[in-house]
Amino acid sequence: MPGGILLETRELTKDFGGLRAVDRVNLRVEVGAIHALIGPNGAGKSTLFNLIGGALRPSAGRIFYRGQDITDLPPYRRAHLGIGRAYQLIHVFPNLSVLENVRLAAQALGPDNFRFWVPAGRLHRYLDRAWAVLHEIGMAELADLPARILSHGHRRWLEIAMLLAQEPELMLLDEPAAGMALEQIPRLIRLIEEIHQRRGRTILLIEHKIDLVMRLAHRVTVLHHGRVLAEGTPEEIARDEEVQRAYLGERTWMPSSN
Ligand SMILES: Nc1ncnc2c1ncn2[C@@H]1O[C@H](COP(=O)(O)OP(=O)(O)OP(=O)(O)O)[C@@H](O)[C@H]1O
């Protein structure tokens, strides 16, 4: 399992005017880990994701991917290195079918980036990959539907499918369970476990649903007011009194054993 550091931030800082949204964050994500970022609203989680993906420039600090300093690289260069984030380089086209959206995502990082018409040989390859991903996440029966008529929950699945189609090495999942019906959550957990185990991907996850985090994550980093409040295994985080006070409140849960 985990071995070596895939992503590292050093003293990463982001100011919005007088507000310090991310405050000297040192984050280390191990190769092959499922690493969760949790914290109250406004803690800086999304801002940190935007810094890692390259949508935002830091005010100070550096970001390293496989030891390479990527702080000054634009988002598409980071995507080519293997950092994948839904919605960063590709958008859902509402009038295109689910399949076509996933197919365009599959070709987005290749030579046919954003071309609707591509040579037949390569088109088949992208379509095959799109179908495989749709089958993998159980969306094949929705393949022909235009994306605009998907429910909010299915739209989240489509975003995950588009991300998977790009085969990133590091997947940034920003609240994947948001907007999903409760009965969909076990399926989401299974999917993330499969992506991790079968595809050997590293996953960095923002999630408010604590049970899901405790079930999935190997490491948890807690952000509070832009700073790292605690970092550890789910069990360590669950026991941390400062985390209890700042975020978890009176909840009395324990991590699942499997
Ligand atoms: N573009 C921006 N301009 C100004 N302030 C911003 C901007 N983006 C975020 N902020 C502020 O930075 C702080 C951190 O926000 P961020 O969205 O990163 O938190 P979060 O932990 O992701 O919250 P949530 O869980 O609610 O999504 C907040 O105070 C927010 O208002």
Image (cartoon, rainbow, N blue to C red):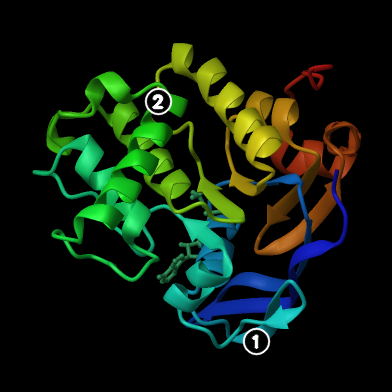
**Residue shown at 55%/53% (left/top)?**
172
Q: Which mark is residue 60?
A: 1
Q: Which residue is mark 2?
A: 135
From the viewer's perspective, tell me whether residue 188 is left or right of residue 26: left
Q: CA distance from mark 2 to mark 1?
A: 43 Å
Res 81 → quadrant: bottom right
The amino acid sitting under disc 2 is: His
Q: Is residue 238 left or right of residue 103?
A: right
Residue at point 35%, 64% (across, down) = 89
Q: Which mark is residue 193?
A: none
Q: Position of residue 236 (x, y in %)?
A: 91, 37
Residue 134 visible at all = yes
Picture residue at 43% right of the left edge, 40% below the top:
160
Residue occupying the point 53% across, 73% down: 78
Q: Quadrant of the N terminus?
A: top right
Q: Residue furthest left?
A: 95
Q: How many marks?
A: 2
Q: Is mark 2 within 8 Å of ligand 1?
A: no
Q: Where is residue 53 shown, x and y percent of the image? A: 52, 68
Nearest-to-viewer mark from 2 and 1: 2
- Above or below, comparing residue 75 to residue 210 in the picture: below
**Residue 21 x %, y %:** 57, 69
Q: Position of residue 155 (x, y in %)?
A: 30, 34
Closest to the observer, 244 or 25 = 25
Closer-to-camera residue (73/21): 73
Q: Quadrant of the C terminus?
A: top right
- How packed mark 2 is, by other alpha carbons closer than 10 Å (few <14, some 14-19, many 20 or more), is some
The answer to whether any part of residue 249 appears in the image is no
* Pointer 2 or 1: first along the chain: 1
